[in-house]
Image (cartoon, grey):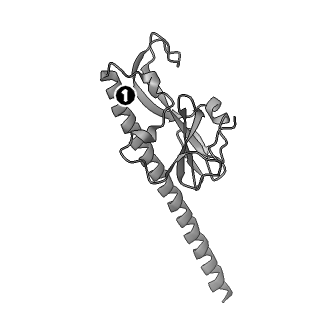
Amino acid sequence: MLISLCLLGVFVWFLLSALEQTAEQAERVGLKLVLNQLRAALVIKGAEVHLSRRERYQDWRGSNPMMLLQEPVAAYSGLCGATRLAAGQWCFAELNAKNGRGILVYQPGQPITTEGQAGNRKKALAWSVAIDYADSNSNGQLDKEDRKTGLKLMPATKRNRTAIDPNTGVSEK
């Protein structure tokens, strides 16, 4: 009887571990899918800006990339509010209400690491729209002599992150 209980306990532990790994993998795949959709939309918008005489890349820096999708993802809740984001939810945190610039925030439900960011239920992940460019002088910064080539989604900078409460996605102004 004792051996049966021990074997059952080991089996349940193994089953729960496999279930947790599957949940983590499903969330990681879902996150990558959304990021790829946003990046594809930014490539299209970048091409439109390049061909346009009226728009500039600077106008789109820090914008809300969810607005470029025909329909935002189901887990997108709009502008970040004062309450904590639910696991698996997205919101846009405006850092500058005048021009609508900010960062896109995702609240993981499982511990997850992607694109150099580590998040969990207590630490949200964040991205911002940036200008893609050919770095002619290899200094890692967009300069006047660099050629702008489009728009891209990249992990939010430390400067932007410190302005956002990771629990709610709300600016700490």
Among all residues in the image, which is located at the extreme left?
51
Q: Along the horizontal axis of the image, is 40 left or right of 21?
A: left
Residue 67: where, in percent of width, then height? 43, 40
Identify the residue at image location x=53%, y=32%: 100
- Provide the secondary structure element on which disc 1 rests: helix
Residue beneath disc 1:
46
Q: Nearer the viewer, residue 107 or 137?
A: 107
Residue 86: where, in percent of width, then height? 59, 55
Identify the residue at image location x=44%, y=14%: 146
Three-letter amino acid code at disc 1?
Gly
Rendering quarter of residue 147: top left
Rendering quarter of residue 38: top left
Residue 120: where, in percent of width, then height? 62, 51
Q: Is residue 57 above or below residue 28?
A: above
Among all residues in the image, which is located at the extreme top?
145
Among all residues in the image, which is located at the extreme bottom?
1
Q: Nearer the viewer, residue 131 or 85?
A: 85
Among all residues in the image, which is located at the extreme front?
98
Identify the residue at image location x=69%, y=37%: 172
Q: Is residue 16 above or below residue 83?
A: below
Quadrant showing the C terminus: top right
Specify few, some or many for label 1: CA neighbours under 10 Å numbering under 14, 14-19, or 20 or more. many
Rendering quarter of residue 91: top right
Residue 33: where, in percent of width, then height? 42, 48
Q: Is residue 124 above or below residue 20?
A: above
Number of marks drawn = 1
Quadrant showing the N terminus: bottom right
Q: Along the horizontal axis of the image, is 164 left or right of 49?
A: right
Q: Nearer the viewer, residue 124 or 32?
A: 124
